Amino acid sequence: MTSSSGELRPGRFAGRVALVTGAAGGQGEAEVRAFAAEGASVMVADVLADQAGEVAADLRRHGHEAVAVLLDVADEGQWTDAVDECSARFGRLDVLVNNAGIGDAKGVVDQGERGWDRVMAVNVWGPLVGMRTAAPLMARSGGGAIINVSSMAGMTGYDHAAYTASKWALRGLTRSASRELADAGIRVNSVHPGVIITPMTAHFGLDVIHHYSRMNANRRPGTPDEIVGMVLHLASREASFTTGAEVAVDGGFLAAGANRALELAVSRGEGDP
Ligand code: NAD
């Protein structure tokens, strides 16, 4: 497998173990497959146990070490079971990717308490519990790297209120954890994807995805492989001095979005530059 953001590097993660949440599909599946391709043993964790099992079985058919585990990240007991399983199977844990996340397409006025609580439970509480449950095993493994998958919504305003608040919260949690876990040799960073074509966004339709991507500097949506490159870099020893960092992988939306919007308005005849 190759990545559109660069060739994968077989052997970079040899002897190491990576646990990815939400790994049954979308970006998480791309990440867990890339870790395996680069030599890691992987834990394929997802609330969709059957699909996670299919990903792990496919990886094993291709000669990789992969174990599927049922994990609703909002459930602390399931986190304990997943990390225990990782310890029993592989004896160590080097990389945790808190990738699982959900949305709720409500604004401030319409957001209900139940939807708010579920988004916060999955997108914020889940990574917090994951970090504290995994950290002791990672520390016993000599340290490691945690990557929290936030969003460009965690760096700007967005009309999905709970989702945006949760991704900002995850950004703050990442900074706190980077300080707290540094003495255990664990680096903690956040990745902030822009619009990426995955099952999460596919239901909006490709037309809509491409419509919003016109705001990116490069005027196109991203692919899961283009997030993979950054996640694996942050997990690797090449990033040994990087902790508490927030990396936008957004096609230049944050840098250029306002300017692109102005261009589009002018091209529609709304204003004279
Ligand atoms: P996706 O919906 O395609 O896949 C998410 C995976 O997480 C699924 O396999 C799902 O079963 C799993 N999942 C959902 N709830 C879970 C839970 N409680 N416990 C464990 N697993 C659970 O999503 P994606 O687009 O691949 O997004 C991955 C991450 O990237 C999310 O955190 C998302 O918020 C973030 N993100 C996505 C985009 C985008 O445009 N796709 C943009 C910015 C940020």
Image (cartoon, rainbow, N blue to C red):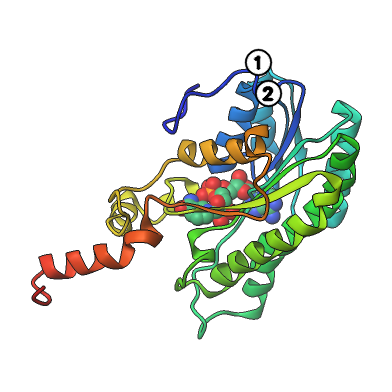
**Category of crowding for the residue at label 1, using alpha-carbon neighbours closer than 10 angstroms: few (below 14), some (14–19), many (at least 20):** few
- Residue sitting at x 54%, y 69%: 164
- Residue sitting at x 68%, y 50%: 243
* Distance between mark 1 and mark 2 Cα atoms: 6 Å
Residue 212 image-quadrant placement = bottom left
Reading the image, the residue beneath label 1 is 61
- Badge 1 marks a residue whose secondary structure is helix
Residue type (three-letter) at the residue carrying disc 2:
Ala
- Residue sitting at x 84%, y 56%: 76
| Residue most extreme to the front | 241
- Nearest the eye: 5 or 44: 5
Q: Is 266 displayed left or right of 97 in the figure?
A: left
- Badge 2 marks a residue whose secondary structure is helix
Quarter of the image where the C terminus is located? bottom left
**Category of crowding for the residue at label 2, using alpha-carbon neighbours closer than 10 angstroms: few (below 14), some (14–19), many (at least 20):** some
Residue type (three-letter) at the residue carrying disc 1:
Arg
For residue 48, above or below residue 272: above
Reading the image, the residue beneath label 2 is 57
In the rendering, at what x and y percent does residue 69 appear? 77, 38
In the rendering, at what x and y percent does residue 153 appear? 50, 64
In the rendering, at what x and y percent does residue 215 appear? 30, 59
Do residues under tags 1 and 2 come within 8 Å of each other at their CB atoms? yes
For residue 6, above or below residue 178: above
Residue 194 image-quadrant placement = bottom left
